[in-house]
Structure formats: structure tokens, C-alpha cells
Image (cartoon, coloured by chain):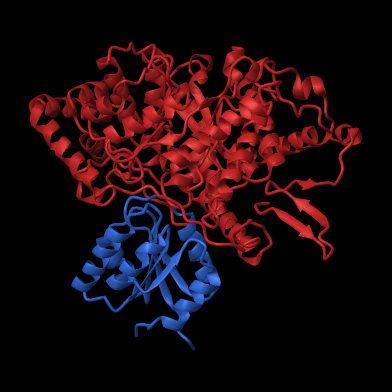
Amino acid sequence: MGVAKYIKNEKDEVEDVILQSGVRVKPLYTNKDLEEIGFDPDKDLALPGEYPYTRGIHPLGYRSREWTTRQYTGFGTPKETNERFKLMISHGQTGLNVAFDLPTQMGLDSDDPLAEGEVGRVGMAVDSLRDFEVAFQGIPLDRIGVGLTINAVASIVLAMFQAMAENYGFKKDRVSATPQNDILKEMIGRGAWIFPTRPAVRLIGDTIEYSMKELPRTNPVSVCGYHIRESGCSPVQEIAYAFQIANTYIEEVLKRGHQIDDFIRGFTFNLNVFGNLWEQVAKFRAARKLWAVNLKERYGAKDHRSLLLRGLFGGGGYGMTKAQPENNIIRGAYYALAAALGGAQTTALCSFDEAYTIPTPRAALLSLRTFQILMEEIGLRDTVDPLAGSYFIETLTKQMEEKIIEEMKRVDQMGGMIKAVETGYVQKEVARQAYEFEKGIQKGELIKVGVNKYTEGEEMDVDLHEYRLGSAEEQVQRLREVKRERDNRKVSQLLKDLEGAARAEKNVMPYLLECCKAYATVGEMTEVFKAVYGEFKEPSIF
Amino acid sequence: MEKKIRVLVAKPGLDGHDRGAKVVAQALRDAGMEVIYTGLHQTIDQITNTAIQEGVDVIGLSVMSGAHLPICEKLMKEMKKKRIDDIMVVIGGVIPKRDIPRLQEMGIQGIFPGGTSFDESIQWIKKNVKQRV
């Protein structure tokens, strides 16, 4: 498993197809295949909105409500980001997903020497509440949900978001934020980690626990199979690892004495869409069923709303190429189709300039148009789970299900996801597959149009987003201003209180909220956590 | 017996995307080189110290965030300071064409943007490396 196989003979007939997940695809499927695999429409499918939710979490799917579109957005200063938010919304985008720069993601202020060259480069620079006030100026937070792609310092950023919303007069039980807040996937495939595994997971527990009461419309985690797939794992591993990561966070909250039904509805998922269309669709259907089963049987969830897998299916970054970038527009359309056939609640696409840098307005808007055309013109809103009953898709869905269960068992045998990550098992496995995949591309065994086949033609010119050096200077100026104008004695005291709470293993969120309101900086709050928790040591995998 | 070429594959700065670095590390090792991978979030100080400790012939940077110019400038300065500017430096990742001349001016010798084949980078290193005794 790990690398797809497409064997063609000299006559260009496709002789063998093995999906990356390891399933062999036959030239023809009939009702015999359904019999052979033991397909039971009542047990395996039921109706959309009914256990086990294979067909969807809502009886009417997109008939009742379109999906939410939220392109990953953010760069430079909060003001520049605010303008881009408004541009996207004015073009029909229905949600936000904030991109933060690397210093912010790593808990560093814009004036930190380690931040040099990175301020505002891959996302918006955020140092204090002042930046959030600028970033969200004029955004109707009671109507627009906001994804916050932040992980190691998600607790800090969520508290800052609440402080900002309240400053703008929004009630905390009306705003809907979704901090990504998934540290284990960082350690596997995204790399924006700071603290060691156990304290980091405890912080996640704090945000979930806090949100239960204080931020009921907030989704405190978005568990990501996405980045693990970007790093090289197969679609079935993507689901298996995401579910095991989610289970780790569930158990962190359960051990504090809470009931599963009281918090699980705040969990969302972020899953990938590139690659074989059928494999992705079957993956999403199998995932929905297995999530429901996981919660019912492993955790005894009673409320049917607890069993619903709500997800952002999208992105597709690894599918995008540097060569012939306009091809990526086409890829995006197919990936969006996979997401819609898979029943995503929310979606986003990597834009056609993905392999170069963060998107220009034109590229980002094209992604939006991709979704709008799909939903308005192509018929994706017409009926729920249109591929249900297909001999091929139902067989494939069951096969994916079996493989996902196998992979989940492997993690269980290792003692759970934290152990799997601390020993480097998952990282090794992912790196190995990434290598095999790359060898396949370079040998021409896996075809990538424009890269190793159909490479003829002029190299296309692409207008690129330019990093504006001035944004870093402006950001540092504002940071200095904030530090001058705030009550520094108060900040000092509140940071001490935060440290006390962290050391006593109290829920840090109320303390973070006070710090944020007093304009403590991301860097200052992170320093407190670093002093208490230490830093993650990457396991050596070579 | 020919001494193996020793390569330090390094992830400088804050960028956490390490798929490429790990893939290249495996390829270089399969090509018979000795590879040390630094892991993420390395400062220039850490990279240069490791290069000295490990007695490497090549420092290979992997940068995906677009910060390659400031990073390389800092690295070359530090290597000069530590008197190891005779170690070959190569870079891969998200490197726009228009930055290649500037990188070469700084003293970065091998530039392998995304899409470069293993073969190309391996042959280039084997041909151009000056192994340290």
C-alpha cells in the first residue's frame, strides 16, 4: 500500500489499477460484487441523516443548504488581510478561514529575531488583540463562521478571538470560530508544533472544555487528515490517523469527567481531495459511517447529533503542480466535484498558483467560482449522495471501510496516537510512502500531466503574489505602540497568573482571555507556556 | 575505499514542511551518501554547528516558505564567520527562477527547485563536491 499502480500494456490498454489505498479496481462491477462483499443497504447505508450516515449527515443534503466556502486567506498586516476577507465575501464566499504567518503560528512576536524574514509572508501577522480588532473590522461575526488555522497556540488565538468579538459587541454564544487546534497532525505532517505532546494535548482539552460552556457555537477542533495526506500517507491512512487523533482528544476530555455527548458535536474534520475521484468519494462515505460507529461503540455516544462527521473536504495541495499552472484550475474543478459527491459541509481549494506562493486575488476568486459553478450549474445540489447504489462505489466504500479499520487497529496496537507519534512510527511510514510516490513520478510510473507526460508547450507566465517587506516594518511599529500604550504592570501580573494556572494544570482559557484583553502579546503568552511545558523533541526517523 | 559523501539536510527557520527534505534525504542515502537530517526549526547557528560536528561535505537547505533569500544570506555570513565557507551549499524547495542569480551570487552552488529529479541533484553533487579530508 502507499503508491497507486496503473499498469498499461503496449496497446495502451489499462491492465491493472491499484488505488493508493491498496484496493484493486476491476474493469466491471455488477450486483454480484455487492453480494460478495456482503453489502446490506439497511446496515451499510440507511438513509442520509440516519445511522450510520454513510449517505450523509442530513436528510436533504445540499437541497436544504449549500456548503460553506472558506478559502484559506491571510497575508501581511491585519489591514491587508481584512481587505482580502471583504473581497472574498463580496464575491460570494460564505465563511472565513484565517491564515497566520509562521511567527504567529510558532508563538513568536513580529519583532522576535527568529521571526526575521517571515513576518506576514505566508499569512497574517498577529501579535496582540489590536491586530485582531483590525483584521475583523466590519465582519459580521454573528453571520460568518471563522476558521482559525492555528494549532500550537490555538488556545491563545481562540481567547483573542473571543476578546475581539466581545469588543465589537458580539455575544460569545453567537460567534462561531473553528480553531484548527490539532497538534498531533502538526507533529506528523505540518511542523508548526512548539510544546511536547502531553501538555499540547492538555491545552486542546482546555479549549474543548472551555468552549462547551463559554463558546457553544464554536468548533474547538478541526482534526486534520489533510496534512498527513499531504505528507504522503494514503487515503485510508488519512482517515485512520485522523480518527485516532480525534480519539486522543476525546479521551483527554473524558478523563476530566465530561460526557461524550456534551462536547463531541464541536469536533470537525479537515480532509483532502486530490487523487483518484472514486477513491476520495468512497473514502468520505466510509469515513462518515466509521465515525458514527466509532462514537457509538467505542465511546457510547447516545445523542444522534454526536455521531455526525462534519467536515471541510478540500484543498488538494499535493495534486497541484508547478509545471503548466493553469492545469491546476482544471484539477481544482475535479477536486471540488469529489468534495461535493463526498457530501462536504465546508470546502476550500488550493488555487492554481499553489505551487508558487500564496494566492493572488484572481487565483483565489477562481477557486470560489469553481464552487459556485458546481453548485449552480452542474447539478450537485439536486439530490443527496447521488452515487449511492452504484455497484462500484458501494463495493469500494466497503473496501475502504475495511482498510481504515485495519489501520486504526494498528495504531491501537501501538498504544494510541500519542505513542505512535512520539516513537516516530507514523512519521516514518508517511516519509517512506512519500519517497515511493516521488520515485513513481520520476520513473514515469505515476502520471502527472505537464510534469512527466504532455510536457510540450510554452512555459506559462503566472502573476504572483508579492511579499511586501514594508508590512513587517508596519507590524513591528504597531507592536511597539501597543506595548507602549497598554498597562504593562497589569500585563505582567496577568502573565504571572497565567503561569500559575498552567503549572497547577487549571484550565488556562479564562487566564488567556484576561491576558488578551490587556493586550498581552502572542509571544509573551507563549513564553509562559514554554517555561512551564518545555518544547517538543522531534523523534529521529532516519 | 571511497569515502562516502556526507550531506547535512537542513530545515532552517520556521517552515514546517518537511516532505521534500525527507524524500531527498532518502534518495541521497540510496545513492550511497551519508545523510544527517537536522529536523525542523533549525537556527543558522544550529545548522552551522552541526555541519562542523558532523564534518559534512555538503549542506543542503530545504525552504518552502519563500524566505530563502534572507535565510541564505544569514547562512553564508555565519559560515564565513565560522570559517567553513568551503563547505558546498545547495538548496531545494520553493525557489522562484528569478531568485536563482541572487542565490548564486551569495555562494549557493547547487539550486534544485521543486521538480528537479533525484538523478540531476545527485549527479551534480557527486560531480562538484570537494570532499573534506
The image shows residue B95 at horizontal and vertical percentages of: 40, 60
Give the image quarter of residue B6.
bottom left
Seen at 24% across and 49% down, the residue is A469
Q: Is residue A309 above or below residue A183?
A: above
Q: Is residue A466 left or right of residue A183?
A: left
Q: How many marks?
A: 0
Q: Is residue A224 left or right of residue A497?
A: right
Front residue of A471 and A18: A471
Q: Find chain A in the image and tell me its colour.
A: red
Front residue of B99 and A524: B99
The image shows residue A495 at horizontal and vertical percentages of: 18, 29
Q: Is residue A134 above or below residue A190?
A: above
Q: Is residue A506 visible?
A: no
Seen at 49% across and 64% down, the residue is B24
Q: Is residue A472 above or below residue B19?
A: above
Give the image quarter of residue A237.
top right
Q: Is residue A82 left or right of residue A20?
A: left
The image shows residue A222 at horizontal and vertical percentages of: 48, 30
The image shows residue A465 at horizontal and vertical percentages of: 38, 47
Give the image quarter of residue A208.
top left
Seen at 72% across and 48% down, the residue is A19
Q: Is residue A323 above or below residue A262?
A: below
Q: Which chain: blue?
A: B
Seen at 51% across and 46% down, the residue is A352
Q: Is residue A55 left or right of residue A333?
A: right
